[in-house]
């Protein structure tokens, strides 16, 4: 759902070879030139992310992707940020002896701009996000429209691009189950209509989380994204 639109719940021959080879070598990390494997980036500690909430043995942290460069680095040339979509990487750490299940459809991004109406945005499905990313500026995929007489359907190439993007996003999407003493992470996607400044006034809301065995419904979680937007 887009921010501030009717679908919101109110709310980028012939030349000597030697110089080119030298430039390439100079650009490579010394570890690679020495035949060594570059050190992997250190794992993220969810507890150290500025946006998090924790109680009843569960830690939920959120890392919003608030720049085009970061979004492109993760998702490729066609990416969520360029389509006005906020990608949020969510970490779930279960410190209990029981599995914990999250009702993903119940999650909301609550946006409360100063002096403006509160809006509750639902996560986009991978398919809806893919349509917006492949066709930025086009009609919202959840908009119901009457068929246009004589209008042809999308091209096969376009459909294949959307399906490829859908599959890639689905592989990254947040899972709904966290095992005992385990940490999982994945993405949620929200259509902000490119109003990324609103993240400073947004909260990720998890109303339906349950411990599996023994069955117990946990209190809701609210992850304030404001600290991550500074």
Image (tube, rainbow, N blue to C red):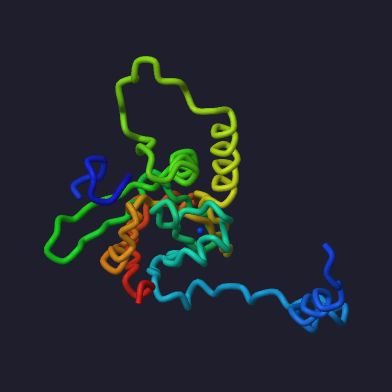
- The image quarter containing residue 222 is bottom left
Image x and y of residue 116, in percent: 14, 59
Residue at image position (34%, 56%) is 194
- Quarter of the image that includes the N terminus: top left
Image vertical order of residue 186 relative to residue 95, above or below: above
Work out whether residue 185 can be spotted. Answer: yes
Farthest left residue?
115
Front residue (pair 132, 173): 132
Q: Is residue 58 left or right of residue 15?
A: left
Farthest top residue?
149
Front residue (pair 58, 186): 186
Image vertical order of residue 56 relative to residue 26, above or below: above
Work out whether residue 62 can be spotted. Answer: no
Front residue (pair 45, 12): 12
Give the total number of marks visible in the rendering: 0
Image x and y of residue 73, in percent: 57, 63
Residue at image position (46%, 53%) is 80
Farthest front residue?
14
Image x and y of residue 97, in percent: 54, 61
Residue at image position (51%, 54%) is 79
- Quarter of the image that includes the C terminus: bottom left
Front residue (pair 160, 122): 160
Image x and y of residue 205, in percent: 32, 57
Residue at image position (56%, 56%) is 75
Image vertical order of residue 126 relative to residue 82, above or below: above
């Amino acid at each position: 759902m887009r921010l501030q639109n009717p679908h919101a719940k109110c709310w980028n021959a012939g030349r000597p070879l030697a110089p080119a080879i030298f430039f390439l070598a100079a650009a490579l990390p010394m570890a690679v030139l020495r035949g060594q494997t570059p050190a992997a980036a250190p794992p993220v500690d969810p507890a150290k992310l500025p946006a998090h909430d924790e109680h009843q043995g569960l830690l939920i942290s959120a890392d919003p992707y608030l720049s085009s460069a970061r979004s492109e680095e993760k998702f490729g040339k066609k990416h969520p940020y360029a389509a006005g979509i906020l990608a949020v990487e969510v970490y779930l750490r279960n410190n209990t002896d029981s599995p914990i299940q999250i009702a993903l459809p119940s999650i909301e991004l609550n946006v409360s701009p100063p002096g403006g109406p509160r809006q509750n945005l639902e996560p986009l499905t991978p398919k809806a996000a893919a349509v917006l990313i492949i066709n930025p500026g086009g009609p919202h995929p959840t908009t119901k429209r009457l068929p246009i007489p004589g209008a042809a359907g999308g091209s096969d190439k376009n459909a294949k691009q959307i399906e490829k993007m859908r599959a890639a996003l689905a592989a990254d999407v947040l899972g709904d189950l966290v095992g005992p003493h385990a940490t999982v992470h994945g993405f949620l996607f929200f259509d902000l209509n490119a109003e990324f400044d609103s993240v400073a006034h947004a909260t990720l809301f998890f109303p339906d989380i349950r411990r599996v065995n023994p069955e117990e419904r946990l209190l809701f979680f609210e992850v304030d994204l404001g600290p991550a937007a500074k």
